[in-house]
Image (cartoon, rainbow, N blue to C red):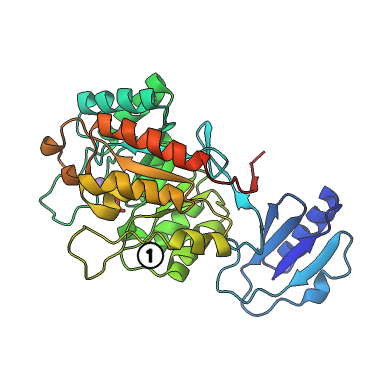
Amino acid sequence: MLIVMNPDASQADIDRVNEIIEKLGYKPHPMPGFSRTAIGITGNKGAVDPSHFENLEGVADAIRVTKPFKLVSRDLRPEKSVVKVGDAYIGGDELTLIAGPCAVESYDQVFEIAEAVAASGAKFFRGGAFKPRTSPYAFQGKGEEGLKILAEVREQYGLNIVTEAMDEKGVDLVEKYGDCIQIGARNMQNFSLLKYVGKTRKPVLLKRGLAATLDEFLLAAEYIMAEGNYDVILCERGVRTFGTHARNTMDLSIVPAVRTLSHLPIIVDPSHGTGKNYMVIPMARAGVAVGADGLIIEVHPCPEEALCDGAQALLPSQFRVLEAEVRAIHEALEPQKAVIPA
Ligand code: PEP
Ligand code: MN
């Protein structure tokens, strides 16, 4: 059930609807938009009786939701959402660039890359301290020590930190040191982890699973939002197909598909999406051209020595080329209506 308020409904009207939802034993999710607020209801087992709401002051409509997802849906908020991450925004008029190494390897490695990323004008720095590796013998990340290095990068360069958590303990640590919790492709359907990050108040970058459909992807975001954390950014990072020319197949058609169904921002990851250095810039251009809100890019000063994902890392000089090109492409596109958080 979705309660759509009148454009002139007062805060007291909205509070009254929230109260009734809570009295019924459900959870209200008020979502202010440009012209009106809508309130999503979760926690109900069967259909909710619309007569509880229809005659209340300020209520325009009580609508049954037929899609499998509610809170991620454009029915709840017809405009795009903008998510605040640290002191910057994702999903607004400005193109988001998140750049940095796959993994935090050392203080010197991270600071060399951070210097280049900060000089480029990107506002977000990435780097994994907890790495989900296929082999248990591969470098697993520096853990809390790595997060401390990332926190120093924020201190020194003012970059907002995006970094992955793989379990609940990791979430607690990323909350402490970082600005945005990345949930990796392999954990997209780790439902207990999704619920856990849903209880935090840090924004979440949710990467699409290796074989996830659009509905599965949006329902994973719904898990986080149903717990009350509405600051979710989606990320297309390629899916498994029969192709062997690239590490994954970047499914760019998901960007317009997400736009029609969801108000959440979506960025693309041409680094993991292709796995190959020479493909990253062309696919980054394509990602921006298709309407993504931003890009997440792996950068390393010495890719052949990288402890993780060296084959797809851009040199800092290549990242500068990418940045100039994708900003020009983004400039050419029509801005879309978006709701900037208070
Ligand atoms: C990463 O961003 O370094 C990463 C491991 O990504 P994914 O979960 O998309 O493989
Ligand atoms: Mn990587």
**Cβ of disc 1 within 8 Å of ligand 1?**
no
Quarter where residue 320 is shown: top left
Question: Where's the N terminus, which quadrant?
Answer: bottom right
Label 1 packing within 10 angstroms: few (<14), some (14-19), many (20+): many
Q: Amino acid at mark 1?
A: Gln
Q: Nearer the viewer, residue 97 or 181?
A: 97
Question: Can the viewer see residue 312 in this picture?
Answer: yes
The residue sitting at 70% across, 67% down in the picture is 2
- The quadrant of the picture occupied by the C terminus is top right
Q: Is residue 69 found left or right of 110 in the rendered image? A: right
Q: Residue at x 27, y 44 (%)?
A: 130
Query: Residue 76, how many percent across, how many down?
Result: 66, 61
- In terms of image quadrants, where is residue 303? top left
Determine whether 10 is above or below 100 in the image: below
Residue 299 coordinates in the image, percent (x, y): 26, 36
In the displayed structure image, the side of residue 115 where residue 224 appears, left or right:
right
Query: Secondary structure beneath disc 1?
Result: loop
Residue 81 falls left or right of residue 274: right
Q: Which residue position holds label 1?
A: 189
* Number of on-image labels: 1
Q: Residue furthest front?
A: 332
User: Of all residues shown, which one is farthest toward the bottom?
Assistant: 46
Tell which of 11 and 36 is nearer to you.
36
The reply to whether residue 308 is in sight is no
Q: Determine whether 87 is above or below 252 in the image.
A: above
Residue under the image location 77 percent in, 52 percent down: 35
Q: Nearer the viewer, residue 299 or 134?
A: 299
x%, y% of residue 256?
50, 60
Which is nearer the eye, 43 or 66? 66
